[in-house]
Amino acid sequence: MSLWDIKASKAVSISGKTTQQQSQKEAKNVTSACWVCAKGSKIAIGYDNGDLYIWAIPEVTSTQNSSSMGGQNLPIQRLNLGYKLDKLPIVSLQWIPSDGKAGRLYINGFNDHGHLFQVLILNEESESRIVKMVLPIAESCQGMELVTGLSDPNKHRQSALALLLKSGHICLYDDSEIERYLLHSQSRSPPTLPNCSYVKLPYGDSGISVAKFYTSNPAALASLDEDYFSSATKYPCLFSMKGKGQTLTSFTNIHKTRNLYITGHLDGTISFWDASCPHLLQIFMIKQQNKDDTSTGNPITSLQFDMSSSILLSGERSGMVHIITFKKDSSDNIFSFLNAKQGDNYDVRSIKLKGAVTTMSSISKSKHFAVGTEKGIVSNLLCSLYRTFFFFVTV
């Protein structure tokens, strides 16, 4: 390991040279590195055989006054990811300081035969300098990032550890729960392992079968007279760690919603997303049910939403068409119906057509919808508040 003086463009300190010569029988390559301090005095280096060395970095003044470039030949700590025989390459490292006390080092390693994600707590002031924990993820982690946001303007900052898994899903851990576990894991009553929650992305989700995008003001979106990205400030946090597994049914700034993203899923679910800024936020979902309150489980194959009348049509592979009429209020925003309590803001009627529904279209403000099926039949539906009239046209 070499320490370079950037201005002088030369190495001022070399460490580990003797150690490398002594271990030529076991060749290994550096795969990752990161600082493990706040002032640049220590660095962690990960190798392709799972070894993790922590080196002390000499101060610049001491290297400048020294006539020799010789440095330390032994690291201050030698660790290993998992069992030494596993030899999992350390793909990435990330250091999280914690008020100058017990910082945490996140270690991610995997190969074709296995994976492991480990967290270490390094505390020089404690008798137990190193405390380890393994996050029980089901598949290898392709990337990690610490996302920090404000859960509440009047509360402390909240951070989430986001792990991108091999399948494309994002796994979230509350970073404060990880810290709490590490600090109390050796006590008489250790806490339980932190729980993870999975983020369902509206784009790239394999469960989505159809999607539609609607905007309340196409002219404003085209001219960009209002900064599209500044509206992200209305969101309290990109990843909410509260109420894991639940959807956001409403929020105070729903009247500011300008863009709506509707997705239909393979399990029959319809999801509504606020797309007013690049961070899509799920508002609520509708899951079609049978008369006995069980889920239909039929994949959604087509969607059509008429904004002026607040009527949504969803078509299924089974040939079922659901007419969902939302209750409007006095607000000027055409998406204001999303602010009502979920389940109380819409009525559902259903009709059965021959063949799987393949396409839908509508004439704005007319309440007329055209529905096509795989049998070559086009149905013209006139949807009012209380009734639905339709006739068939065979193509």
Image: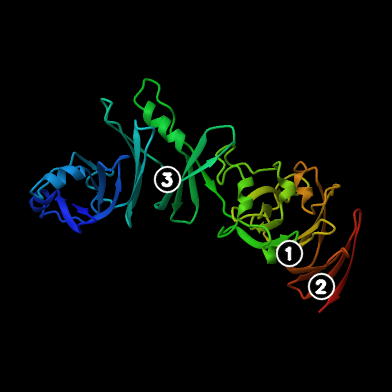
Q: Image quarter for residue 120? A: top left
Q: What numbered label is drawn on residue 218?
A: 1
Crowd class of label 3 (few under 14; some 14 to 19; many from 20; radius 10 Å): some
Question: What residue lies at 48% left-to-right and 47% top-to-bottom?
Answer: 171
Which residue lies under the disc numbered 3?
137
Q: Is residue 255 above or below residue 216?
A: above
Q: Earlier in the sequence, mark 1 or mark 3?
A: 3
Q: Are marks 1 and 3 in contact (CB under 8 Å)?
A: no
Question: What residue lies at 76% left-to-right and 74% top-to-bottom?
Answer: 375
Taking 379 as reference, is 152 left or right?
left
Of 298 and 161, which appears nearest the observer?
161
Which residue lies under the disc numbered 2?
378
In the orientation shown, which residue stands out farthest toward the top? 188
Residue 303 visible (yes or no): no
Q: Earlier in the sequence, mark 3 or mark 2?
A: 3
Give the amino acid type for the residue marked by disc 2 in the picture.
Val
Query: Distance between the Cα atoms at labels 3 and 2?
Result: 48 Å
In the orientation shown, which residue stands out farthest toward the bottom? 395
On the image, the x and y values in percent for residue 54 come to 23, 42
Q: Earlier in the sequence, mark 2 or mark 1?
A: 1
Give the amino acid type for the residue marked by disc 3 in the picture.
Ile
